[in-house]
Amino acid sequence: MNLQDKLSPFPIFEKIAEAARSEDVQAYVIGGFVRDILLKRTSKDIDIVCVGSGIALAEQLAKSLGPDSRVAVYKNFGTAQVRSGDLEIEFVGARKESYRSESRKPVVEDGTLEDDQNRRDFTINALGISLNEADFGELIDPFEGVRDLRMRMLRTPLEPAITFSDDPLRMMRAIRFASQLNFDIEPDTYDAITGMKDRIEIVSMERITDELNKIILSKVPSYGFKLLYQSGLLEKIFPEMIALHGVEIIDGRGHKDNFYHTLQVLDNVCEFTDDLWLRWAALLHDIAKPATKRFDKKAGWTFHNHEEAGARMVPQIFRRMKLPLNEKMRFVQKLVRLHLRPIVLSREEITDAALRRLLVDAGDDLEDLMKLCRADITSKNPLKVKKYLANFDLVEERLEELEERDKLRNFQPVITGEIIMQTFDLKPSREVGMIKEAIREAILEGIIPNEYEPAFAFMVEEGRKLGLENIQKKADA
């Protein structure tokens, strides 16, 4: 099969072929780019294997492309990268690898194209296209990868036990590709994952989390998580999610399976956003339900305060999984903490005070919070779903009206701690905190507007209740 017509929209391949002739080496485009053009998916990452020095070939290409191209050389890995426009082209010499059982770092030697294809993770990623003059555009498919693409099947080029033992991260990659491409995993390949799941323990958490994030960003991430669960990998990498699984029944009363509910919420939120961190908030919104689960003979199953307990778990999970402990983590933590608030409001008579508190607490993340809340409606009763969504519409309308009127989003009381301390000649103390909290509550309850004069007068009165004297007024007298 010749794929020259598939390469013709990319003039860069003719340039690479010219550079390879200049260096007197054979060059091939291999891996994900070939897979994606056959699947008619867009791809900007190009991997080039040459039988010779990949670094020398990259440097020769960069010269021919002129001053606008940039080449980065990684001598320790024997690779180089050339950037040209929005394309990233990785170059490596053909190689063969051997592994020790206790490490996923290979011993690397120069090899042939066949050696290089043997070391690839899956048949669909071992496809190559020649960039050589004699057979430019010819497909090289030693493991029937094209057949597997047609069958939408993931299969290893060599025996699965060899492929996964050499590099256990490939087990995560199998599930990630299945989730991204909506492929099946070939039975022997899947059996090897379940049998070798313990090998994932030698892989760094950073690499595991990178694959997990790609699963979360796939179109239907629940598919990937179900494969992780069924294979046993999820228990190794994310035990908190395993704890969500299952239904307990007492006196004939059971609760919903929070594992599958969480996956449904995750899929639902994907309809609203491509944002990784909002998807993480969906994944973690009920993470503390196992820890807070109680059975009450009257009320049945309860999960009181699971939102607050879940928010406290977020930093622990992010730290262990090597996720960022910055504003991304704080965003997820905030949404986990607040995810019940709009739901409660949608079921009750809505007061302005409750809406003000939600506006203030959610701040600029209010829209994302409402997306999460809508995704959290997983009832199979369409009438219930319709009712909840209508109630959410009402909550959002009221929030918009209140925000337009009171401008409370991200609000701070006009009376600061410094003003309180100056007025009553105080140092940082319990009394300062009490007055500050009283002012905040009065504004949120609508007792006073968030304006200096009424807020100052309220502060003086609160101070008087605590036996404090306005020293500024005394000095003026």
Image: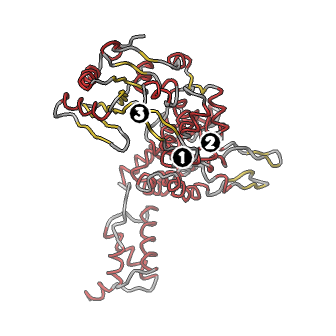
Measured from the top left, where is residue 73 in percent x and y?
29, 41
Q: Are marks 3 and 2 in contact (CB under 8 Å)?
A: no
Q: Quadrant of the N terminus?
A: top left
Quarter-of-image position of residue 89: top left
N-terminal of the pair, mark 2 or mark 1, is: 1
* Tag 2 secondary structure: helix
Q: State whether residue 17 appears in this view.
A: yes
User: Type of residue at label 2?
Assistant: Leu
Q: Which of marks 2 and 1 is in front?
A: 1
Q: Which of marks 3 and 2 is in front?
A: 3
* Tag 1 secondary structure: loop
Q: Which of marks 1 and 3 is in front?
A: 3
**Which of 349/43 is in front?**
43
Q: Do the residues labelled 2 and 1 touch (CB within 8 Å)?
A: no
Q: Do the residues labelled 1 and 3 touch (CB within 8 Å)?
A: no
- Left or right of 391 on screen, residue 18: left
Label 1 belongs to which residue? 103
- Left or right of 395 on screen, residue 475: left
Measured from the top left, where is residue 306 in percent x and y?
61, 55
User: Type of residue at label 3?
Assistant: Asp
Label 2 belongs to which residue? 233
From the viewer's perspective, is residue 318 above or below residue 32?
Answer: below
Label 3 belongs to which residue? 110
User: Type of residue at label 1?
Assistant: Ser
Measured from the top left, where is residue 300 in percent x and y?
75, 51
Measured from the top left, where is residue 414 in percent x and y?
33, 67
